[in-house]
């Protein structure tokens, strides 16, 4: 699974970096805030977590992909995820929002076509339903519990639409640890729009310096830092370099449990 994620990162990084730069220019016209990153671990009152790739392992669908398409499962999962991200970013640039469930489905259809495999309605339904029960990474529940003990507000801030996020959180057994599940559907634009990160501030009702944003996606970390948030990068692949966008994480950790051990109150 680690090599699967590593290959995916190499494929997608170039596209994400290029689109992110354009997205920043787009949001300047809607009042986006650009701030310098700053280091701050103490004083955090709330954490907003990215969902896919951070809390939930998007490549946990690979087993089902391989079951349905023997010999093509890994490639299907990688292309599916890459196009899912590309479509979300491109739709934001185009001003043509579509909720993440349908973006994910469109990406799956593309992935199947690109590999020349037969995506029947039944297979498509099984794969889409699998996105509602993605496995959580092993460190997630324990990390959230430790942060909860420090009386810190915990929320998801994700491109996902509400039903997807709520069912995934419940399936992973972390729904009771969350104070809020925040979807971009409230603002109808995907990350890395500053409006998404502002949504986290508005919903959690904390100051910019008191909200920590956590993601395993380096481009997401850059987006949050650009919007003035204190960002924490979960580097799930230790050899993955940060994106060169001029905005760095305040801290880099390997797991949620490590993050919890470093954060003061």
Image (cartoon, rainbow, N blue to C red):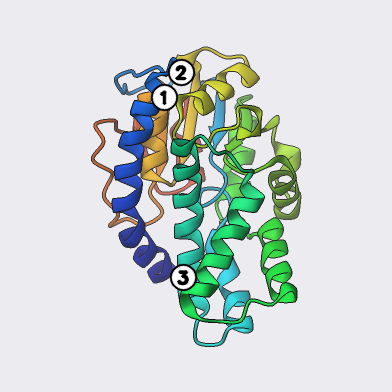
Q: Position of residue 208 (x, y in %)?
A: 47, 15
Q: Position of residue 39 (x, y in %)?
A: 32, 23
- Residue situated in front as seen by the camera: 177 or 244: 244
Badge 1 marks a residue whose secondary structure is helix
* Residue 112 can be seen in this image: yes
State the residue position of label 3: 1
| Lower position in the chain sequence, tag 3 or tag 2 | 3
Q: Real-space Cα distance between discs 1 and 2?
A: 5 Å
Residue drawn at the location 31% of the way across and 21% of the way down: 38
Classify mark 1: residues with Cα within 10 Å, few (<14), some (14-19) or many (20+): some
Q: Position of residue 234 (x, y in %)?
A: 42, 45
| Lower position in the chain sequence, tag 3 or tag 1 | 3
State the residue position of label 1: 27
Whether residues under marks 3 and 1 lie with C-beta atoms below 8 angstroms apart, the answer is: no
Q: Quadrant for residue 23, please give it.
A: top left
Residue drawn at the location 37% of the way across and 20% of the way down: 28
Q: Is residue 216 above or below residue 136?
A: above
Q: Real-space Cα distance between discs 3 and 2?
A: 39 Å
Query: In the orientation shown, which residue stands out farthest toward the bottom?
Result: 70
- Residue situated in front as seen by the camera: 206 or 151: 206
Residue drawn at the location 50% of the way across and 17% of the way down: 210
- Residue situated in front as seen by the camera: 246 or 178: 246
Whether residues under marks 3 and 2 lie with C-beta atoms below 8 angstroms apart, the answer is: no
Classify mark 2: residues with Cα within 10 Å, few (<14), some (14-19) or many (20+): few
Whether residues under marks 1 and 2 lie with C-beta atoms below 8 angstroms apart, the answer is: yes
Badge 3 marks a residue whose secondary structure is loop
Q: Is residue 193 above or below residue 5?
A: above
Residue drawn at the location 55% of the way across and 37% of the way down: 49
Rendered image: mark on residue 30: 2
């Amino acid at each position: 699974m680690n090599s699967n994620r590593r290959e995916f990162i190499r494929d997608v990084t170039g596209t994400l970096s290029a689109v992110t730069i354009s997205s920043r220019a787009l949001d300047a016209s809607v009042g986006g805030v650009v701030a310098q990153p700053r280091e701050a671990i103490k004083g955090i009152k709330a954490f907003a977590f990215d969902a896919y790739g951070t809390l939930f392992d998007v490549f946990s669908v690979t087993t089902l992909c391989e079951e349905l398409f023997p010999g093509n499962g890994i490639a299907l999962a990688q292309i599916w995820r890459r196009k899912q991200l590309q479509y979300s970013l491109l739709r934001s640039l185009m001003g043509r929002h579509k909720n993440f469930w349908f973006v994910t489905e469109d990406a799956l259809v593309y992935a199947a076509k690109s590999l020349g495999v037969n995506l029947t309605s039944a297979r498509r339904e099984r794969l889409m339903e699998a996105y509602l029960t993605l496995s959580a990474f092993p460190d997630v529940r324990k990390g959230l519990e430790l942060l909860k003990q420090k009386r810190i507000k915990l929320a998801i801030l994700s491109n996902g639409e509400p039903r997807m996020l709520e069912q995934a959180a419940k399936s992973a057994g972390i729904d009771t640890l969350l104070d809020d599940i925040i979807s971009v559907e409230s603002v109808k634009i995907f990350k890395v729009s500053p409006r998404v990160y502002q949504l986290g501030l508005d919903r959690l009702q904390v100051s910019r310096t008191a909200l920590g944003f956590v993601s395993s996606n380096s481009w997401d970390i850059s987006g949050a830092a650009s919007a003035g948030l204190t960002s924490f990068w979960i580097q799930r692949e230790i050899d993955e370099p940060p994106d060169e966008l001029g905005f760095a994480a305040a801290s880099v950790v390997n797991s949620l449990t490590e993050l919890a051990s470093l954060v003061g109150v």
